[in-house]
Amino acid sequence: MPYVSSSSSSRLSQGYDVFMSFRGEDTRTSFASHLYDALIRNDIITYKDDMTLEIGNPIASKLPEAIEASRIAIVVLSSNFATSKWCLEEIAKIVECMEQGKLIVIPVFYHVDPSDVRCQRKCFEQGFSDHEANPEIAQQSVEIWRDAFRKVGALSGLHVTPNRNEAEVIREIITKILKEMPDTLPVDEFSGLVGMESKVDEVKRILGVESSEALFVGICGMSGIGKTTLAEAVFKNIQKKFERSSFIENIKDISKQDDSTDLCKLQQKLLDDILKEKSVRVQSVKHGQTLLGTKLRGLKVIIVLDDVNHVDQLTYLAGGARMSAFEHGHPTHVYEKWSDDIVKLAGGLPLALNVYGSMLYGKEESYWKVMLKRLQEFPPKDVLGRLEVVFARLDSNQQETFMYIACFLKGRDMDLVKDIVTNIGLYSECGITDLMNKFLITINLDDCVWMHDLLQRMCWVILRKKSHIYGGMHFAIKNFQDIVEVLLSKPKESSTIRIINQEKVEMDDFIDDPYCFSIMRRLKFLRISNVRFPQGLSYLSNDLRILEWLECSLKSLPSNFKPVHMYELEMCYSQLETLWEETLFLKGIDQNPRLDINSKTSETDS
């Protein structure tokens, strides 16, 4: 956010674009407020001091530092400016920095005559006289203030008069400031980024910033090669050359192809950034397309969409180009649906798109149909192999954290995931941070943990391979038939199972053994449905962290079930009549578990 109040010191070391000096009682709710809003809309980082604070307040000591950390000072000279000791101290410091060549000063004569400022007469005369008569103020200080006042009054500035539109003056100020802003990033913006400056220059050349043509430029590549870093550097470097700008991160988390609500949110975010107002509301995806087309017309705009993983995300905005397995730019009508499905399956990953395209090029429609189904279950070796290399380079803590997220915790709240992973005995702070730094997981706008669909499928494939290599050892299972088989046969290898995350199925099955879970003492996550237990259930692992059981047919959970590590228990549409004694359940629990138990019995009774 461009605004930094006088109570904030976090940006002092980073610097400001503008320092605003004004007399609060004259302009706080009028000109200064409107000017400040205009600075924000143009992404100009502004220090705006709080003139309601007393001089003795410690915050006042920050003002000289803030002035020194600024590129430009706007001094709004109004009728009561000279009555404030604080304002005069500011203007003295501003002139000191100006004379040292550290600061550009833009005076605004707000309903006052510049000559009166230079000579300290009329409305300014009394203020200086009062300061001279004040025994607590050194005469030397008053002379410094008078000298600074004269020098600022002699500068070329902007004049606000009763006959001039204030909005017009503010536009002139913004234009003047933008011209004074540096065209290139300071050297420290590239600190630690080897070769970044040359890459930024290359992208700028491709963009042709001075051109009036509309242009799409895509930065593609595998995770971790610096695509976002480069995009951010380019955006910061050329942003001021455009009338409007927008940088939206994590597009894949904001915009889901099958969710029109998310697409509307993306369109709304763009409109809010570009129009700098929130009066225009997107009603539908089609409405958003129309608004973007009409509202952006005639404006010079730069838009950066970070982490785009579906071509349709661009299509919904401006009908962008399409990557495909065809020599020409667009698939024929008969292949259009299949090509869209392939793009969705690849998740926008360039490596996957290239591999899929080479596999499908020139093949019949029937081949596409079969291959699509196969790819959903088994990613190609060229893709899987590359991703497996990344996984193999993780240490054991990172690998296990990754597997828990991929197999069960994806899409859950970040804090919850950290707590659970730590509770399991892993170093969650290190593991999750490491996975984020390696671009294997991200945190979306809802603060939930997310990962690429291909990475998630890769994890399941790796686990399936390991189960064959190590004599059937499992970490997690999701296939319905595999789950039923394990529960029926209870092989000794099933003692290693930590996760049962059942895929949705339409069929039901029955298990007559009430001790079918007895060997799974390390089971930590269980999501199951469509499985009936006619003889009841006599054991569930006390190590469970999350239990989700849709339409549970049991009348009660095992009496010896003591889930002291439970975080969530969800049993919607169950036939449960009782759980367990509350004191037994709560004893030893460190966290407050989330319970969602909606039984058919209670609904019928009500």
Image: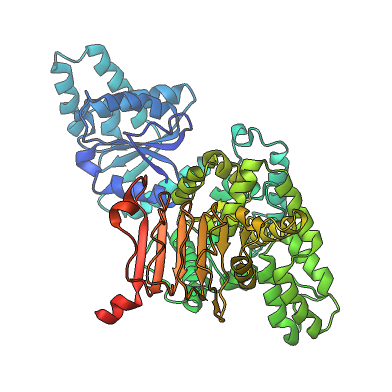
Tell which of 9 and 234 is nearer to you. 9
Q: Is residue 493 visible?
A: yes
Of 364 and 217, the residue lying toward us: 364
Residue 502 against residue 173 in the figure, above or below: below
Residue 316 at what x, y percent from top left?
A: 57, 72
**What residue is shown at x 34% (from left), y 27% (from top)?**
63
Judged left or right of residue 359, residue 34 is left
Give the residue displayed 72% in from the left and 53% down from the top: 222
In the depicted view, which residue is nearer to us: 34 or 275?
A: 275
Depth check: 544 or 123 in front? 544
Q: Splitting the image into 4 quarters, where does residue 331 fall?
A: bottom right
How many callouts does the rendering have? Answer: 0
> Is residue 348 placed above or below 294 in the rendered structure?
above
In the picture, measured across the screen, residue 217 lies left or right of residue 426, that is right
On the image, the x and y values in percent for residue 237 come to: 60, 45
Q: Position of residue 576 (x, y in %)?
A: 36, 71
In the rendered view, how is the structure colored?
rainbow
Name which residue lies at 59% across and 58% down: 407
**Snapshot quadrant of residue 92:** top left
- Which percent across, then down, holds residue 77? 28, 36
Q: Please, is residue 416 above or below residue 262 in the view?
A: above
Q: Is residue 205 left or right of residue 503?
A: right
Quarter the C terminus occupies: bottom left
The reply to whether residue 245 is in sight is no
Residue at x-position 73% and y-position 86%: 333
Instruction: Pick out the residue farthest to the right.
Output: 362
